[in-house]
Image (tube, rainbow, N blue to C red):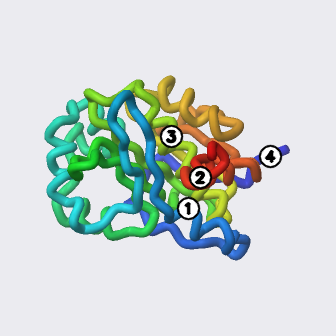
């Protein structure tokens, strides 16, 4: 069956995520609840971001390599301007993974993807270089997919510049994924209803 998604080669600035008419009003409150992820001996608190995280996210950016920043923001491997980061942290669909002393080790966000139809949300994900391949990225991807599904979106879109294979492995965990080899190559993941089970607070409750 032909997809209704339309891909375009250019990417204007992202728009805030807006709930669709099919939003699940019961799941969305669960999507905003913090939860704990154990990574080795460290218990990370994953929670919605606030403007108070600005300094910690700036330090995260300084610890990340240009390649990691390129995969997250493009922009030549540089972090966005302070004002743009501040705006991102104030959005309700941005989450951080923080240590008990408040150091931010990862940040994930959803935004309405203007390059595709109104049922597509873009995923942005950045993990501290020293904390990659420890499950943090997968944990955040599952949660953000659940949040997108609960908000009424049908597809999750990602634009990894150099990490296509790694991003594809993460997104295959949440739904059927395909690579679109446009001028701006990207990933489409179709979200099943079961994606809501990926919400962090839901998984924590199911684990007892």
User: Residue 23, percent across and down?
Assistant: 68, 71
Residue at image coords 20%, 60%: 54
The circle on residue 18 is none
Tag 2's secondary structure? Answer: loop
Question: Is mark 1 in CB contact (under 8 Å) with mark 3?
Answer: no
On residue 31, the disc is: 1
- Give how far across and how far down residue 89 sits, in percent: 31, 63
The numbered mark at residue 199 is 2
| Location of mark 4 (residue) | 2
Q: Mark 2 or mark 4: which comes first in sequence?
A: 4
In the rendered image, residue 78, in percent from the top left (x then y), is placed at 19, 43
Asked if the residue at tag 1 contacts the one at tag 2, i.e. Cβ–Cβ closer than 8 Å, the answer is: yes
* Quarter in which the N terminus is drawn: top right
Q: How far apart are labels 2 and 3 at the CA level?
A: 9 Å
Foreground: disc 1 or disc 4: 1
Sequence-wise first label, 1 or 4:
4
Q: Earlier in the sequence, mark 2 or mark 1?
A: 1
> Of label 3 and label 4, which has the lower sequence position?
4
Q: Nearer the viewer, residue 23 or 155?
A: 23
Q: Mark 1: which secondary structure?
A: helix
Residue 139: mark in rendering: 3
Separation (CA) of disc 2 from disc 4? 30 Å
Q: Residue at x 17, y 36 (%)?
A: 63
Mark nearer the viewer, 3 or 4: 3
Marks 2 and 1 sit apart, C-alpha to C-alpha, by: 6 Å
Query: Would residue 206 appear left or right of 15 to someone viewing this image?
Result: right
Mark 1–mark 4 Cα distance, whole angstroms, equals 31 Å
């Amino acid at each position: 069956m032909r997809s209704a998604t339309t891909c375009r080669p250019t990417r204007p600035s992202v728009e805030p995520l807006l709930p669709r008419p099919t939003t699940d009003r019961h799941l969305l409150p669960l999507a905003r609840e913090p939860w704990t992820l154990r990574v080795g001996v460290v218990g990370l608190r994953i929670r919605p971001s606030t403007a108070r995280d600005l300094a910690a996210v700036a330090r995260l950016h300084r610890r990340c390599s240009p390649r990691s920043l390129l995969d997250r923001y493009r922009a030549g491997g540089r972090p966005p301007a302070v004002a743009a980061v501040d705006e991102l942290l104030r959005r309700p669909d941005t989450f951080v993974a923080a240590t008990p002393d408040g150091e931010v080790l990862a940040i994930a966000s959803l935004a309405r993807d203007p390059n595709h139809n109104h049922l597509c949300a873009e995923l942005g994900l950045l993990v501290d270089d020293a904390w990659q391949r420890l499950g943090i990225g997968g944990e955040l991807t599952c949660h953000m997919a659940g949040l997108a599904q609960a908000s009424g979106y049908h597809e999750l879109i990602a634009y990894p510049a150099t990490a296509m294979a790694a991003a594809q492995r993460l997104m295959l965990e949440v739904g059927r994924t395909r690579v679109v080899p446009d001028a701006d190559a990207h990933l489409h993941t179709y979200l099943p209803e079961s994606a809501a089970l990926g919400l962090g607070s839901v998984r924590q409750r199911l684990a007892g």
